[in-house]
Image: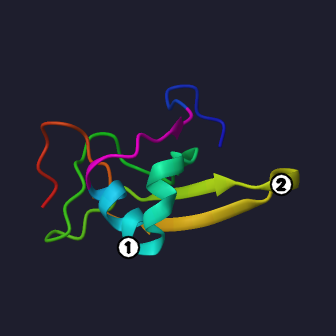
Amino acid sequence: MDNRERKLHFFRTDIRGNLKKELSKISPKAIEVNPLIFHFALYTDEKVVANRNKNTRAPRIYFMLGKNGVIYILFFDPYHEINPIQGINHK
């Protein structure tokens, strides 16, 4: 996508809140080793806040990098609920 107004959304993700809760369900010991988890955004209308009740999406994909650059998908977050923007209620 060649849109100079839109910034690339690719971040290392802090293991906190909902991400920590969900990751501990998959592998409780993973929290202890503090794995490097990243996420990137799929198309998001920056003028609209995600809202499950209104079916307004702001999808994110959370993943880890493995050997030889293999991407291990952890979560698909269609409503940006795993690590929402601080101070904004997405529900």
Q: Which residues are magenta?
A: 8-17
Dot 2 falls on a residue whose secondary structure is helix
Disc number placed over residue 25 in the picture, else none: 1
Q: CA distance from mark 1 to mark 2?
A: 24 Å
Left or right of residue 70, residue 60 in this image: left
Left or right of residue 83, residue 73 in this image: right
Q: Residue furthest top?
A: 4
Badge 1: residue crowd in 10 Å (few <14, some 14–19, many ≥20): few
Disc number placed over residue 68 in the picture, else none: none
User: Which quadrant of the rendered structure holds the C terminus?
Assistant: bottom left
Asked whether 46 or 85 is in front, the reply is 85
User: Which quadrant of the rendered structure holds the N terminus?
Assistant: top right
As displayed, is residue 56 above or below residue 53? Answer: above
Residue at 48% across, 69% down: 27
Q: Residue furthest right?
A: 68
Residue 48 horizontal/vertical position (percent): 24, 47
Dot 1 falls on a residue whose secondary structure is helix
Asked whether 65 or 60 is in front, the reply is 65
Left or right of residue 43, residue 80 in this image: left
N-terminal-most mark, 1 or 2:
1
Residue 73 horizontal/vertical position (percent): 61, 66
Residue 61 horizontal/vertical position (percent): 51, 59
- Disc 2 residue type? Lys
Disc number placed over residue 67 in the picture, else none: 2
Residue at 38% across, 65% down: 24
Secondary structure, magenta segment, majority class: loop
- Disc 1 residue type? Lys
The stretch drawn in magenta includes residue 10: yes
